Image (cartoon, helix red, strand yellow):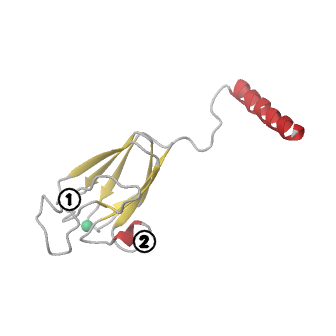
């Protein structure tokens, strides 16, 4: 027990010293940004496939030129608000269930977590975490 307390105090002292002498950030992994853009491209891809923002950060999905018929469907747990509905290919209404260029979508993520999503006309829920089909992940870090 005594050793444990000493260990904890030593750790606090080390951290405190590090902060006092820092004089600037030496972190080689800076925090992710509060804003980022994912391109919905003409080759049925979300790029980058995995993107990160801080809690409270906003992702903007932007449809590239000649990009057609895509939506953004959350796979859930945690979930975010869909852009369009999960229609099967060849079904649904353009501008309601899926969207052509020019289009964009913004969502602000208030909670940390890994949010999977896919396009229902070019992917499946499995596309969020595989490299098969049109999908991706937003990693929201504290
Ligand atoms: Cu698509």
How much space separates mark 2 and mark 1, taking CA atoms?
22 Å
The secondary element bearing badge 1 is classed as loop
Residue 80 is situated, as x and y percent measured from the top left of the image, at 33, 52
Identity of the residue drawn at 35% across and 73% down: 133
Instruction: Look at the numbered discs 2 and 1 and tell me whether their residues touch, using CB distance below 8 Å.
Output: no
Q: Taking 138 as reference, is 141 above or below it?
A: above
Viewer-closest of 36 and 13: 13
| Label 2 residue SS | loop
Specify the quadrant of the image occupied by residue 27: top right
Residue identified by numbered label 1: 84
**Mark 1 crowdedness (10 Å alpha carbons): few <14, some 14-19, many ≥20:** many
Q: Name the one closer to the observer, 14 or 65.
A: 14
Q: Which residue is mark 2?
A: 131
Q: Position of residue 44 (x, y in %)?
A: 29, 68
Is residue 35 found left or right of 24 in the rendered image? left
> Going 89% across and 40% down the picture, which residue do you hit?
3
* Nearer the camera: disc 2 or disc 1: 1
């Amino acid at each position: 027990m005594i050793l444990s307390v000493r260990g904890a105090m030593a750790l606090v002292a080390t951290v405190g010293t590090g902060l006092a002498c820092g004089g600037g950030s030496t972190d080689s992994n800076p925090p992710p940004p509060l804003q980022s853009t994912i391109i919905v491209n003409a080759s049925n891809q979300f790029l980058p496939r995995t993107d990160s923002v801080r809690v409270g950060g906003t992702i903007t999905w932007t449809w590239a030129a000649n990009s057609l018929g895509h939506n953004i469907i959350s796979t859930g747990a945690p979930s975010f608000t869909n852009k369009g509905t999960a229609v099967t290919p060849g079904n649904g209404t353009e501008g309601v269930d899926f969207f052509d260029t020019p289009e964009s979508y913004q969502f602000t993520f208030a909670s940390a977590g890994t949010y999977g999503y896919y396009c229902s006309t070019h992917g499946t829920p499995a596309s969020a975490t595989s490299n098969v089909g049109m999908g991706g992940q937003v990693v929201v870090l504290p």
